[in-house]
Image (cartoon, coloured by chain):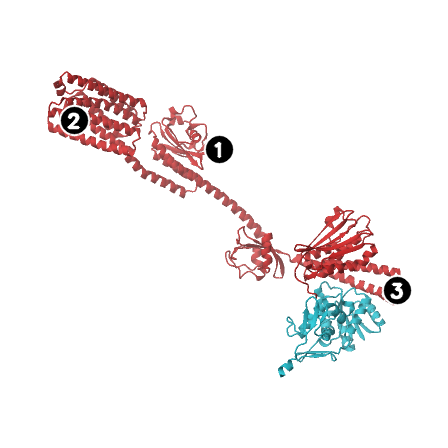
Amino acid sequence: MDSDASLISVLFDGVTLALAFVFLLLLLWHDRRKRQTQTLAMFLVVLMAWNVGLMLVRASIMVGQNSTTLFVGIALVEGGIAASNVAFYAFISTLAGNRSPRLTQVAIISIVAVVAMRLTFSLWALSSENLSNVTVQPRVDGLPIMFYLFYTGMALNTLYSQRRKITSKSVRIGGSLFAGGQFLALVNTNVGISSLATNASAMGALFIVLSIVDSEIIRPLAERDRQVATLHKVGQEIAGQPRLTPVLQEIARQAAEWVGGDAGGIFLRDADELVFVAGYNMPNLYTGHRLGLDSGVAGLVVRTGRAQRVENYKLDLIDTQPDFPYAAIAFGSMIAVPIVSREQVSGVLMAVTGTQGRLLRADDVYRLELLAPQAALVIGYTGLLDLKTTLAEAIEDNRQQLETVLVSTESPVIAVDRRMHLIFANPAASVILGLADVQIGDNITTKLPVEMIPFNLKALAQDLKINNGHIFEVILNTRTYQCHLARLGRLRGGGWVAVLNDVTQLKELDRMKGEMIRMVSHDLKNPLMAAMLQIDLIRYRNNGQSTGPVDIIEHQMERMNRIIRGVLDVERLRNGSLRLTPGYVAPIIEKAVSDLQRLADEAGITIDYEASDELVILCDEDHVERAISNLVENAIKFTGRGGIVSIRGVAQEEAVIILVKDSGVGIPEEIQPKIFQRFFRGQQRGFEYATGTGLGLALVRAIMENHKGLVWFDSREGEGTTFYLRFQRTQELPDMF
Amino acid sequence: MRVLIVDDEQSICDALAARLMGDKLEVVTRNNGRDAMKVFEAWSPDLIVLDIIMPGELSGLDVCRGIREVSEVPIMMMSAQAITEDDIVEGLDAGADEYLVKPVRLNEFAARVHAILRRNAPASVEYDDGYLSIDPQRRHVRVMGKRVHLTPTEFKLLIVLLENAGRVVTQHDLLEQVWGHEYVDDKYYPRVYISQLRRKVEPDATRPIYILTEHRVGYRFERQPNKNNANNS
């Protein structure tokens, strides 16, 4: 035996195993809970025990007769061989995905049994002082061979049969090296050859550890780049492609390529069904395929909300319908992950391999799960885009309709923003307001005719607050427009919109009506005066005496005069313009009553009036007197002999109420709404003879409107009527003149 | 006393004329403005009654203004068309002393005619402070030596106030003394005429120093120190 060669062999083993241990430590540091790493660690430990045993044997031979060390060494060698076989099998089957706990138990029991038996045997050999035999020929017994044959055979078989799962070549080479090394150790117990065996086994172990390090640490690190690149590409696709399908197709392609699958695709949820919307390498026929939620892997994903992995589609999917027609024949393995948006599964992202393709693994699920949110994002994003497009189209449609309406209308419409920049002006507005050369967005403050600026800013502010709009009159090019001004938009200061209505004709008609009434009245008044003067003349010539017929004629003429005056008064009040000055209420009432006292006496009616001296209202005294006397006259007319008409002026907070109450027939309910109309004459029962122009109450209302006051009444048939006049009270003192 | 009545309705003219002639007044009637002007120039009436609305180129207001340029003869206007107080004030502004709204009754008309004629009676009180001077005999009023034309009613109003200088004249007294007892209800007369008068005689009508308003009571004439004397001393 060459001790140098033996020393080199031992050194080689030591370095190799140390390297293997370093890598093992790396793996343990990376993820010590992984079963695969744990079994690998066990494998390496027992391999180490075997090597240590051999070294002990060699050392004891070289040093001399140290029987105890020798025996321990032999025990370690034999136990190590047996245990490493078991551990090797355990590791390979873990790698292949066999997770039976019994496996570990069997392996541990076996190792314990071998070690125990060998120790017993060695102790027995020691006690029998049969040392020399053992020392010179440290051989391996039948039991380790049995272990070897059984476990390593099983392990190699697994390595071959599960080659789809164990794709790493390094593992296969390492496994083969280990098995070969073990074989050498068993067939030749010679120490030299035995060291060759340990070398091979150690190399094998190193290979295996390296491949595991590669698959567990190095490859995932390299994959990060790929992940980032893929996600980046998908992100670009999303940003650059506004339509849903192409982006989903790209995601399906990325999914298939990333996991090394043959095809990929995306289902989207549509109520209680899934619709296949995008595929990569899938038959075109599948696009638009509908799948119930109770069928297929995709259906399961939606039901559970969790990712699903099928290793063998044909075998694993027996109790449900396949995802696609012929999928059972074509699909090998499949991964499907939910696409979750707003806490709901809105679709399924899937990748498949063919029956001869790669087996998709658990870490592939993770990759798809990385891609799924991207798909969710796309769906949400393009959904929003679609909505936006739809909305934009709807808005555009509405805008066009509105614009057509506005453009075609003859009334000028103009809108400006807060800073008086033009937003819109229809052709009518451009022509009438002289804005033909103004562009949208130009400031039109100086270009707008000055008449368009509301002159009564106080009224404007008030109207906007109460009515959200203000109306004023504008005269442009001899035509009169009613300008309706309103805020644009709900926001404060959002702008203004003005609509101008041409009311020239209406104004003209109104003016003509007024003019006509004046003319007619004038033409009536002159002959009336001439006739009345003749009657006066007759009476004058008869020294104040007159005959019955003359009195009757005079009476009728006075009535005619009252009618004409009533018409003119209503017209004049309708035209507004009163000079309101502070006036005492009491004298006004007194004056109104005194003029009617004679009429009341003739009708046998008592007038009773009362008002506080200090009450002052803003009014036109003649008009208020007129309103009161009209009401009192009415009250006298519709109250029977012996009745009472009472007038009161009372203060009520900021107002003064003048009420005229009678004990007359009352106003029938059915005519109550009409009594303020012009020329309406009530025909109360028993008072059909009552005369009037039908203008009295219309005048009262016109007067009250001009005073910004109110008039209303209570009436009950048979009990009487009370009219109320409400005026604004003032603290100003009246100027007597 | 001569009264010229102008109205386009002949029967109205006739009736009014008959009534005034019964009171021993001389009356001439005309139916349009042009004829009225001719009569005014040739006949120099003591009172002119004018209808505002008349056919032809001259309306009653035109005639009134024309006469006021050369004369202070009392003018009484009649109109069928008075709608608002503003219309009445417009007539008075044109220089009319009276404004009657048609239909006018005969007795009222006669009473007012007599009242106006009475108003024109000469007064005796004189006033001169260097700025304003009043000569009741010649019916002349001068401001800073320059003659100002007052209508008879304006003149009468000034005289009544002057006669009561330093004392308040109530609205009622004013109406009765200036216009006549028939007018006590025509409350706006004093207001309108006072403002006219102030425009004509006050240095600043918005801040009167002669004709002062006694709030809620009436008006008061206040004598001013003689400017000439003040300057001389």
Q: Which residue is mark 1?
A: A271
**Percent from the top left, x then y, of residue A440?**
51, 56
- Distance, label 1 to label 2, CA atoms, is 72 Å
Q: Around disc 3, counting alpha carbons within 10 Å, would you say few (fewer than 14), some (14 to 19), or many (20 or more)?
A: few
- Front position among marks 3 and 1: 3
Residue B7 seen in the current view: no
Q: Amino acid at mark 3?
A: Gln
Q: Earlier in the sequence, mark 1 or mark 2?
A: 2
Q: Quadrant of the C terminus of chain A?
A: bottom right
Q: Nearer the viewer, residue A327 or A306?
A: A306
Q: Nearer the viewer, residue A439 or B107?
A: B107
Look at the picture and state if A354 lies above or below A732: above
Q: Amino acid at mark 2?
A: Met
Give chain B's shade. Answer: cyan
| Res B20 → quadrant | bottom right
Q: Amino acid at mark 1?
A: Ala
Q: Earlier in the sequence, mark 3 or mark 1?
A: 1
**Mark 3, chain letter?**
A
Disc number at residue A545? 3
Disc tally is 3
